[in-house]
Amino acid sequence: MPHDKIKVLELFSGIGGMHWALKEASQVVGFDFEVVRAIDICDHANEVYAYNFPNVDVRASNICGLTAEELNKLDINAIFMSPPCQPFSRQGNQKDTTDSRTQPLLHIMDKLLRNVNTLKYVLLENVKGFEVSQAHDILTSVLKSCGFKVQEYLICPKQLGIPNSRLRYYLIASKLEAFVPKDHLILNIVDDIDSSLLKVFQKPGSNLSSYMDFESVKALNDDFLRVEDKLLEKHAEVLDIVNSQSNGSCCFTKAYGKYAKGTGSVIQQSGDLDLAFQSLGQAKEREERLQILETLKLRYFSPKEVSNLLGFPKNFTFPSSMMRQNGTNPRLCFRLLGNSLNVTVVALLTAILFKDYSP
């Protein structure tokens, strides 16, 4: 017998990470979700979203122009959102509510959460640091005043056995009586959820080999993924170098492939890393240093490998308009993926949020 669908409005929708999470969670909760509209200001992100979900109403409209009357006509039950993180990030300006990029979130809090009659669920993802912001305090206060019960988390995918660091703040909120949150910020989700639910999403003992995609690497011109000599010459010592057997990798940011430090790991395809860096310390000439580093055959992860680590499914892809003659435009894909989220973590939180819902 068919179930009623939960109608979801996806805001700051990016390349569709939350939609993929909803699809994954639906297999666990036993009913379907319908994304009635997805909104983001980035044209490239909207292009990727529409390519993967051609039946969704994807718009580049201004969130500050959304009205409760409009959303009431859509009859939405849930808002899933990932607002810009720069106002709250350590690497941003930390202007919080005074940053112009926070205005859409303030509009959501002031004009929408209070006045959308059918809204019963909210899920928000943001950077660590949001939990100590003014925007956070306003959001939680508004939600509680509207009858929502709120649960907050700081989750890294490594807690689920995924070999990638991406510590993020998450909030789920529900008006259901059966939803009983803890009275504290949960720092380790593994200790706070039902083991049967954890078993579905946990990936124990996995290393990077499970996420490699050599077909996507082969499809790209070597120059696109090879770590350039200029970067190796100046920044080899600050690169986070991993191999296929590694159990971790650094968080991939939108600057991956552009800057060396703190933007994501690179893969060692051959050689002995310890021996190479010992030799590097003794080498003085530029050519000698480059020859030593060349033995490691360092390359960037392909966009497909990054999307695998972020939990996107195998059938997720970038549109042909983003393809170069010799393969995908990795810099653009890295930027879009770096602004995205971990699908598996959001799918787990969606399952927690809706586990007591009865269609």
Image (cartoon, rainbow, N blue to C red):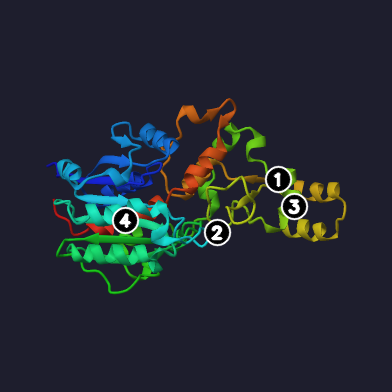
Q: Name the foreground residue: 2 vs 167.
A: 167
Residue 238: x percent and y percent? 68, 58
Q: Residues within 10 Å of mark 2 (few under 14, many from 20)?
A: some
How far apart are labels 4 and 1 at the CA level? 48 Å
- Give SS at disc 2: loop
How far apart are labels 3 and 2 at the CA level? 27 Å
Can residue 284 be seen in this snapshot? Answer: yes
Circles 2, 4 touching at the beta carbon (< 8 Å): no
Q: Which residue is mark 1?
A: 297
Circles 1, 2 touching at the beta carbon (< 8 Å): no
> Which of the 4 image quadrants contains residue 47?
top left
> Type of residue at label 3?
Lys
Residue 52: x percent and y percent? 37, 34
Q: Which residue is mark 4?
A: 106
Q: Residue at the spot x=15%, y=41% of the render?
A: 73
Q: Earlier in the sequence, mark 1 or mark 2?
A: 2
Residue that lies at the very extreme toward the bottom in this rendered image: 183
Q: Which residue is mark 2?
A: 247
How far apart are labels 1 and 2 at the CA level? 20 Å
How far apart are labels 4 and 3 at the CA level? 43 Å
- Tag of residue 185: none
